[in-house]
Each structure stands twice: as structure tokens, then as C-alpha cells.
């Protein structure tokens, strides 16, 4: 029998990757761009530097970022309500994407039932297809348009939520995507 699953993106949803990213790219470029002014997620546009996995790994961005204040409590609440939880993250670019994510979750006391690190040759849409064999995906939350659109266009995902961030706040989404301002608000709307 299939179980109900709630799926989360990791970066800038469960954690505050934006703050570490800003720190690293400010150090590289000397240019200060407050996160609140990020109209898009493009280091070339924002800081004049190219996104490079080596830079992200050397800067320990995914290892050193802090969790969202309500992350741990949200996962606990959903578990108490009988949901399985999963993180679906596009960290396949990182040579230790799986290990670094598991270590970070343990360090911050965030208990999750499943972790899916999307490889460089697949999409989150592909992962939804794999998951649907065993789970009903009751809800998915992300901050990036391309992943939100993959979710809203997948038959297995019942509800899709956009976590409001400066880079998506002025965008109009196609399909039935609900905006929320926190993980707690997301959990209340499932």
C-alpha cells in the first residue's frame, strides 16, 4: 500500500544557502549584493562571476549554511501527522552531495525519511516518477521556477508550493502553484 509523502527541496527551502552563497561570491568579487535584492539566481548577473561547482565546494556552501528556523519543527510536525518526508535536491553537481546532505541533516537535528539527490543526467520530474511507485506525493515545496514547473506538470504531485524568495516573488507561475512564506505555513496548508 502506498504511503503519503511530503517532498522538500533542500537549498533555500530547508536551509539558508543564499546567505553562504552571498558570502562566497562577495569574497570572490568584492561586490556586495544584499540577498533581498536578488532578482534572479545567477552569480554572473549578480556578482560578475560564473557558477562553478569547484567554487561552491571550496567555499563549503552546502556544509556551512544554517537551517531555516522552522525546518526541524516542520519535519517533526509532518511526521507526527503520519506523513513520510523526503528531500529532493539537485546537488548532483557536488562530489559529496549525498554524504554532505546527510551529515548536515544530522548536525542540525532534522529527521527526514528519504533523500533523493538528483544526478546531473536526471531531473526532479524523473525522481517524482520513481517515487510514485511507492508513495502518493501529497505536496512538494521548492523555490526555483523550473522545479516548481516540473512538479506541477507531474501527475504524481498533488499540491505544489513555492517558498517565496526575492528571486521568485515577482514571477507569475503557470499551473496551480501556491505561495507560502515559511515551512510552517506550508505544513499548515497540506
Image (spheres, rainbow, N blue to C red):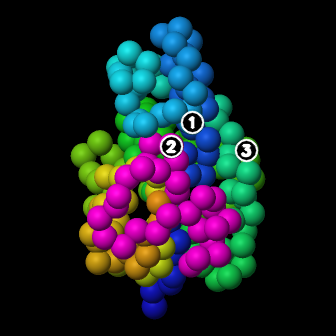
Residue 80's spot in the image, x, y percent? 72, 78
Q: Residue at x 59, y 22 (%)?
A: 23
- The quadrant in which the C terminus is found is bottom right
Is there CB contact under 8 Å for labels 3 and 2? no
Q: Nearer the viewer, residue 75 or 104?
A: 75
| Residue placed most toward the observer, 89 or 189 | 189
How many neighbours does mark 3 have within 10 angstroms: few (below 14), some (14-19), or many (20 or more)? few
Q: Quadrant of the rendered structure where residue 154 is?
A: bottom left
| Residue position for label 1 | 36
Residue 166 image label: 2
- Magenta part of the chain: 163-190
The Cα atoms of the two marked residues, 1 and 2, are separated by 6 Å
- Determine the residue located farthest toward the front in the rendered image: 170
Main SS of the magenta segment? Answer: loop
Image point (50%, 43%), residue name: 166
Q: Is residue 127 visible?
A: no
Amino acid at each position: 500500500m502506498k504511503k503519503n509523502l511530503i517532498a522538500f527541496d533542500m537549498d533555500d527551502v530547508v536551509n539558508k544557502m543564499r546567505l553562504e552563497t552571498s558570502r562566497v561570491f562577495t569574497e570572490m568579487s568584492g561586490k556586495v549584493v544584499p540577498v533581498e535584492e536578488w532578482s534572479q539566481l545567477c552569480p554572473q548577473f549578480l556578482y560578475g562571476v560564473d557558477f562553478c561547482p569547484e567554487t561552491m565546494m571550496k567555499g563549503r556552501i552546502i556544509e556551512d549554511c544554517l537551517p531555516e528556523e522552522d525546518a526541524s519543527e516542520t519535519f517533526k510536525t509532518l511526521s507526527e501527522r503520519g506523513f513520510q518526508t523526503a528531500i529532493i535536491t539537485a546537488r548532483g553537481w557536488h562530489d559529496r552531495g549525498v554524504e554532505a546532505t546527510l551529515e548536515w541533516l544530522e548536525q542540525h537535528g532534522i529527521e527526514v525519511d528519504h533523500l533523493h539527490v538528483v544526478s546531473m543526467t536526471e531531473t526532479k520530474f524523473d525522481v517524482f516518477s520513481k517515487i510514485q511507485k511507492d508513495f502518493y506525493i501529497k505536496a512538494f515545496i521548492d523555490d526555483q521556477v523550473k522545479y516548481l514547473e516540473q512538479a506541477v506538470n507531474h501527475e504524481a504531485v498533488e499540491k505544489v508550493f513555492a517558498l517565496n524568495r526575492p528571486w521568485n516573488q515577482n514571477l507569475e507561475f503557470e499551473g496551480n502553484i501556491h505561495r507560502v512564506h515559511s515551512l510552517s505555513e506550508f505544513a499548515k496548508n497540506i
